[in-house]
């Protein structure tokens, strides 16, 4: 049995949603981001913070794979997607290896 490496990259994303006037409006934006990322191979995403705030959210993303280079490529795509969301302003994006 060969030993394959398993790499995990976690991305912590904080967003400001300036146009959200209630939790329903916020959920619409957040769920769109999470559903999109969740649909990508080897990616899992969830809202993990500021659940009761209308205009702020924290999204956690985990990427799992066998190659650091591949995870870095996927992470770059995740960041590009988040930056492209017109209804959200990026406060911070931090990566850490798990």
Image: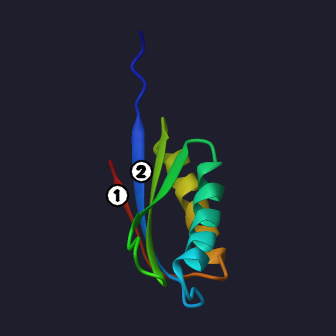
Q: Is residue 77 left or right of residue 96?
A: right
Q: Label 1 vs label 2: CA separation?
A: 6 Å
Q: Name the residue under label 2.
A: 9
Residue at 47% x, 41% y: name it.
64
Q: Where is residue 19 in the image (x, y as percent from the top left)?
A: 60, 90
Callout 1 secondary element: strand
Q: Is residue 51 left or right of residue 30?
A: left
Q: Where is residue 31 in the image (x, y as percent from the top left)?
A: 60, 64
Q: Where is residue 96 in the image (x, y as percent from the top left)?
A: 34, 58
Q: Name the residue under label 1.
A: 96
Callout 2 secondary element: strand
Residue at 64% x, 82% y: name it.
87
Q: Are marks 1 and 2 in contact (CB under 8 Å)?
A: yes
Taking depth in this image into account, of 26 and 82 the one nearest to the observer is 26
Task: Assess disc 1: are there few (<14), some (14-19) or many (≥20) residues with their C-alpha within 10 Å of its C-alpha.
Answer: few
Task: Assess disc 2: are there few (<14), some (14-19) or many (≥20) residues with their C-alpha within 10 Å of its C-alpha.
Answer: some
């Amino acid at each position: 049995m060969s030993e394959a490496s398993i790499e995990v990259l976690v991305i912590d994303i904080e967003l400001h949603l300036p146009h959200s006037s209630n939790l329903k409006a916020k959920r619409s934006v957040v769920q769109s981001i999470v559903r999109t990322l969740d649909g990508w191979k080897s990616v899992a995403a969830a809202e993990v913070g500021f659940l009761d705030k209308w205009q702020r959210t924290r999204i956690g993303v985990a990427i799992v794979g066998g190659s650091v280079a591949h995870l870095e490529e996927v992470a770059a795509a995740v960041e590009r997607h988040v930056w492209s969301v017109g209804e959200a302003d990026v406060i911070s994006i931090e990566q850490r290896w798990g």
